Image (tube, rainbow, N blue to C red):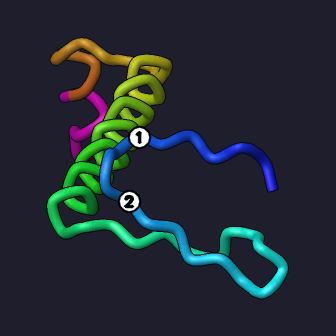
Amino acid sequence: MEKIQRIFGDERFVTGKNGEIEAVLLSISEYAKLVDILEDQKLAAFIRDAEQEITYSKQEALRFLEID
């Protein structure tokens, strides 16, 4: 397995019979930090995607909503 980079200070690794890391144990606070980081990354990806979408002026948007 590739070298594991430690991003927290207290994580613990569970290894199998062959010595390979199979799991990581985190405290609740470390887990919460990780979830926050992942949510921030997902939000940033949504923002980047939205910035690439076509935008419309208010008048253009209202024309799309007009009912004939």
Tell me what residue is drawn at x 22 percent, y 39 percent: 66
Tell me what residue is drawn at x 24 percent, y 12 percent: 57
Q: Return the residue nearer the eye: 9 or 63.
A: 9
- Image coords of residue 14 (percent x, y): 56, 77
Tell me what residue is drawn at x 36 percent, y 17 percent: 55
- Image coords of residue 10 (percent x, y): 31, 55
Q: Decide: few, some or many residues near mark 1? Use Cα within 10 Å; few <14, some 14-19, many ≥20.
A: few
Q: Amino acid at mark 2?
A: Glu
Q: Return the residue nearer the eye: 68 or 5.
A: 5
Q: Amino acid at mark 1?
A: Ile
Q: Secondary structure at mark 2?
A: loop
Tell me what residue is drawn at x 43 percent, y 66 percent: 12
Does 32 sit left or right of 8 as displayed? left
Residue 41 lies in quadrant:
top left
User: Dot 1 corresponds to which residue?
Assistant: 7
User: Dot 2 corresponds to which residue?
Assistant: 11
Per the image, is 65 magenta? Answer: yes
